[in-house]
Amino acid sequence: MLKWALTLCLALLSTSASARAHHGHTKFFPAEHDSVLRENLVANEMGAFRYFTQAQVDTDVRLGKLSALYDQTTYVVSPKLPIERRYALPGTADFVYGLSREYYVAFRQPLMVDSAIRPATVQRRLHLRNAAPAYGLRASTHERGTSVDFSRKLSRSEYKWLIVRLMYYRAIGRVLVIQEKSCFHIFVLGDLQ
């Protein structure tokens, strides 16, 4: 089954109808008008609520409802990401570890996690042109602990490998992916309820 799915992903990689060219680069996971809305609807179904303040994040870290993103072998967290924001829901953290372990086996180097949980108070202060709003149905799912960003600073073979793996995980309903300018935004579907 896995071999069949990977073969399908490779075929999609070479002829993806959903891929769009953007500034000379193919985007296999382009943002669509309702991408973040769809993530929020799925997060609502999962029971993943929005964190509005860092105090809420800190409380759930202490209660074990959020897991630390810390594994210096298979992935590293960007030193630019504040320590208090290096957390995600347990299912998201497990996915990060599993995918990065596969990557490490293939390339003998770690993936880079650029972003994880981000409460609404932090999201509101972002000054990025394409940043999602802090509130509403199109608010960033980083506020829920369901999403992480992986750096796109990869070699060509690493990039292709990651595209194929993400296509596979999307095909089996494990993730939703948006390919942004400098990262892969990955929303991990889970079963909180």
Image (cartoon, grey):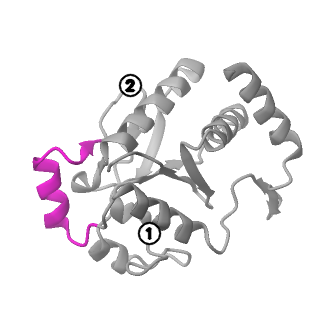
Determine the secondary structure under disc 1.
Answer: loop
Magenta residue check for 149: no
Asked which quadrant contains residue 91, the reply is top left
Residue wearing tag 2:
73
Q: Give residue 122's quadrant in the image.
A: bottom left
Q: x, y (%) of residue 29? A: 69, 55
Please, what secondary structure does the residue beneath circle 2 have? loop
Point out the tag, 1 or 2, that comes first from the N-terminus: 2
Which residue in the structure is indicated by mark 1? 140
Residue 13, percent across and down?
80, 40
- Say which amino acid is labelled 2: Thr
Residue 68 shown left or right of residue 107 in the figure: left
191 vs 18, left or right, is left
Q: Is residue 157 left or right of residue 123?
A: right
Which segment did they paint magenta? Answer: 51-68
**Quadrant the N terminus occupies:** top right
